[in-house]
Image (cartoon, grey):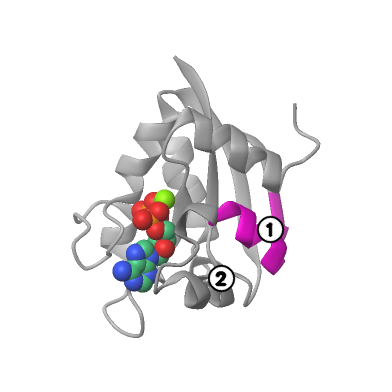
Amino acid sequence: MTERSLVLIKPDGFARGLTGAVLERIERKGYRLAALSVLTPTREMLAEHYAEHDGKPFYEPLVAFMSSGPVTAVVIEGEQCIAGFRSLAGATDPTKAAPGSIRGDFGRDWGNPVQENIVHGSDSPQSAAREIAIWFPGLG
Ligand code: DAT
Ligand code: MG
């Protein structure tokens, strides 16, 4: 089924100049780019985006990190692209992410490696619709 997913290249990926490398992998996989924007997210946007994690120990540091600089927000489109992009991204912890995945190849083993894991990808059609509305309010 053709799906849309919300991908974020997080502040660490943006600052390290990995935006092009991530987009290249998305396109190489055959997914299309439906929308793209570079912005520094507000805490309000991030509170909505990460609502499911509110109250967890990593929530505040995560919101602080995600609002610390520019991110590239991308809507991707393609057959089963939600699960497909999660597979391209690899496990949440870059130390455990398989080589060949974005997090496995580019994730850091210093600082806070779980938090600074380069990319976000929606985890279900419901999350994708909810997240796309946050990052691209005008997109139908
Ligand atoms: P994912 O991004 O793989 O969907 P998630 O939704 O469980 O993972 O968590 C959202 C983000 O929060 C994740 O990309 C990085 C951060 N995070 C998750 N667990 C963490 C932890 N134990 N310590 C620090 N940051 C964490
Ligand atoms: Mg998640």
Quarter of the image with the N terminus is top left
Residue matched to label 1: 45
The numbered mark at residue 63 is 2
Q: Is residue 22 above or below residue 127?
A: below
Q: Residue furthest top?
A: 1
Quadrant in the rendering for residue 25: top left
Question: Which residue is found at the position 71% from the left and 62% from the top?
Answer: 44
Residue 136 place in picture, x, y as percent: 73, 42
Q: Is residue 53 above or below residue 113?
A: above
Magenta-colored stretch includes residue 44: yes
The alpha-carbon separation of the residues under discs 1 and 2 comes to 10 Å
Residue 45 place in picture, x, y as percent: 68, 58
Question: Which residue is found at the position 52% from the left and 75% from the top?
Answer: 60
Circle nearer the N terminus (1, 2)? 1
Density class for disc 2 (Cα within 10 Å; few <14, some 14-19, many ≥20) is many
Question: Which residue is found at the position 64% from the left and 74% from the top?
Answer: 69
Quarter of the image with the C terminus is top right
Identify which amino acid the numbered label 1 is placed on: Met
Q: Residue furthest bottom?
A: 111
Q: Nearer the viewer, residue 59 or 81?
A: 59
Magenta-colored stretch includes residue 13: no
Extent of the magenta region: 37-50
Residue 78 place in picture, x, y as percent: 49, 24
